[in-house]
Amino acid sequence: MKFIILMDLYYLIYFMFLVSFLSLSLNRFHLLMILLSIEFIILMLYLMLVLFLNMYMLELYFIMIFLIFSVCEGVLGLSILIYMIRLHGNDYFQVLNIF
């Protein structure tokens, strides 16, 4: 019974992972929406990692390292967002000139 519930949880997490990629592809015009979609992807990866490590009864130290890197990624994204808003006045990707 526990295995069936665990597999349903895996399917739910995989579905949410795919929905987060769909959200990332649909909300590609604002930097804030892209950052929120990426954070949602990281949250789903975190849940998959926790379930995987608990299922095989492995050490959970890697989860702390993963959380540290995900927080650093979030802080870096927010600092880029603040810099972009101060420089251009909005967070549209259309105002960025790559060339």
Image (tube, grey):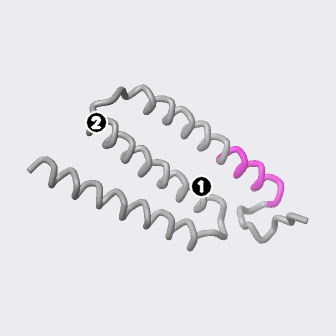
Q: In the rendered view, does 94 fall on the left or right side of 58? A: right
What residue is drawn where x is 53% and y is 59%? 37
Q: Residue at x 63, y 40 (%)?
A: 75
Q: Looking at the picture, which amino acid does disc 2 mark?
A: Tyr
Outermost residue toward the right in this view: 99
| Magenta residue check for 7 | no
Task: Tell whether 78 sits left or right of 42.
Answer: right
Highlighted range, magenta: 78-88
Q: Where residue 94 sits: x, y (%)?
A: 77, 71
Q: Is residue 58 above or below residue 18?
A: above
Residue 56: mark in rendering: 2
Name the front one of labels 2 and 1: 2
Measured in 3D between alpha carbons, the distance from the residue under mark 2 to the one under mark 1, in whole angstroms, is: 32 Å
Instruction: Name the kind of residue labelled 1 in the image.
Output: Leu
Callouts 2 and 1 close, C-beta under 8 Å = no
Residue 35's label in the rendered image is 1
Snapshot quadrant of residue 93: bottom right
**Crowding at label 2, few (<14), some or many (≥20) Cα neighbours within 10 Å?**
few
